[in-house]
Amino acid sequence: MGYHTIVIGGGVAGMQCASELLRQGVAVTILEKESELGGKIRNWHKLFPTFTPAEEVLAELRSRLISSPNLAVRTGCEAAKIASDRVVLTSGEVLECDSVVVATGFTLFDAKVKEEYGYGIYDNVITSADLERMFNEGAVRLKSGVTPRRIAILHCVGSRDEKVCQRHCSKVCCVTGVKQAMELKRMFPGADIFNFYMDIRMFGPGYEEMYREAQVDYNVHFVRGRISEVSPTIDCRLQIKAEDTLTGRPLKMAVDMLVLLVGMKSNALNENLVAECGLKAQPSGFMQPRDSFLHNVESNREGIFYAGAVTAPKNVGESMNEGTAAARAVVEWLAKR
Amino acid sequence: MINFGFSISKPRAIDIDRNNLRKSSEITREMPELQSCIGCGSCTATCTAGNLTEFNFRKVHTLVRRGEYQGAYEEMNKCMLCGKCRLVCPRGINTRGVVMLIKRKLGDF
């Protein structure tokens, strides 16, 4: 066909979209701001609900892209301005194309903003992303080097929270919390793990079953209530307070480690897409597809498409599906044009 | 001593560090299915005893699991073992078994 599409973002959605476009004979340039492709799951250990190593998924996605003469990968560069026929990089360079897929994903919520949880203040308050890094490194330890015996996992940090302008639900943290609790329990069978949640939202296939398995087979404790604050104990542990809303009583305990399940924020670049490129965003900051049902991978501008978590929090499978769907929409649009 | 009408309230907080969780662990080890409770309240909604007294099965077993045993045995005695709660439980918990187990474990409390 001789067409050329620029895919902005080389995460799972962008990689899947690119491989699908290449398969259909469209030349692709992937723009990736990091030094290599892979996006957020590059730093993830295992994926729910099957405990598939994230690296396995990435390796397959990479192998689908490899050795295609029609593919150009530009790492370490960011788009400043997007139109359907050209992308201007922050360096000022202009790249011509026939259509653009925006697959720029999300930004992880900065846990420091919720100061009451003490991230960055107390040594053993970590985020879910930090925990994945520890899993990848092969050891979960307290700052002192010893193994934790009681761990609390707090859901909805930077999600469903008006106080930090994050009204939306990040959707994947609940199941991530359950997954991480199970992995910690496998690592430390004698440890007590408490998950503090507001609602447990198990939206995907196998997720609810996994939650039940965590409860019954892994003996993970679930307390319905949001931790209000964290303070240090005299022996440098973490004192946490919450309401056990199912009994209507306040509850407190000291834990060795607190894991904050940080949510998905809309990508910081989205503001630029709205201001400079005439694209529309939702009140949550995530981009607004042309239609939620019939045109959910298309933007409000002809020739600009969306794939993945740029439009809403999504899991890996959903993001990859959108990569495929966006590629198909691009090909249809190019043929019709 | 003159009674001025003041008293010191006991703290209401459930203090996991002070509570002795031995019995609670024994209970969940014998019936792990109890851990699968999602707090829906169906058991309490359908409970014959709960409609006539303050008895709240969901709340009592949750408190027991947190190590709050005070009064739990007496509460469980309100249960008439009719078994309607077991019929409605979406997690399939043997709720009557839970009542009997808690009474057995905490009977000497």
Image (spheres, rainbow, N blue to C red):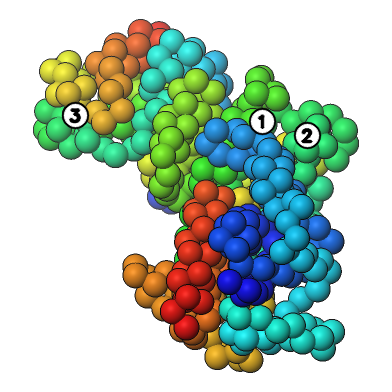
Looking at the rendered structure, the kind of residue marked 2 is Val
Q: CA distance from mark 2 to mark 3?
A: 41 Å
- Residue B22: x %, y % from top left: 54, 16
Mark closer to the chain start, 2 or 1 = 2
Location of residue A147 by image quarter: top right
Where residue A325 appears, as percent x and y from the top left, is 47, 61
Name the residue nearer the viewer: B25 or A283. Answer: A283
Picture layout, residue A42 above or below residue B50: below
Residue beneath label 2, please? A140
Residue at coordinates 74% horizontally, 83% vertically from top-left? A95
Q: Quadrant of the N terminus of chain A?
A: bottom right
**Contact, CB < 8 Å: mark 2 with mark 1?**
yes
Q: Residue at x 27, y 20 (%)?
A: B95
Q: Residues within 10 Å of mark 1 (few under 14, many from 20)?
A: many
Query: Which quadrant of the structure image shows residue A212?
Result: top left
- Disc 3 marks a residue whose amino acid type is Val
**Disc 1 secondary structure class:** helix
Where is residue A43? Give x, y as percent.
Answer: 74, 49
Circle 3: element type: helix
Q: Tell me the amino acid under the disc marked 1.
A: Leu
Q: Is A214 displayed left or right of A25 in the figure? A: left
From the viewer's side, name the closer residue of A44 and A82.
A82
Q: Which residue is mark 3?
A: B88
Work out which residue is located at the far front of the displayed protein and give it. Answer: A1
Give the quadrant of residue A189: top right
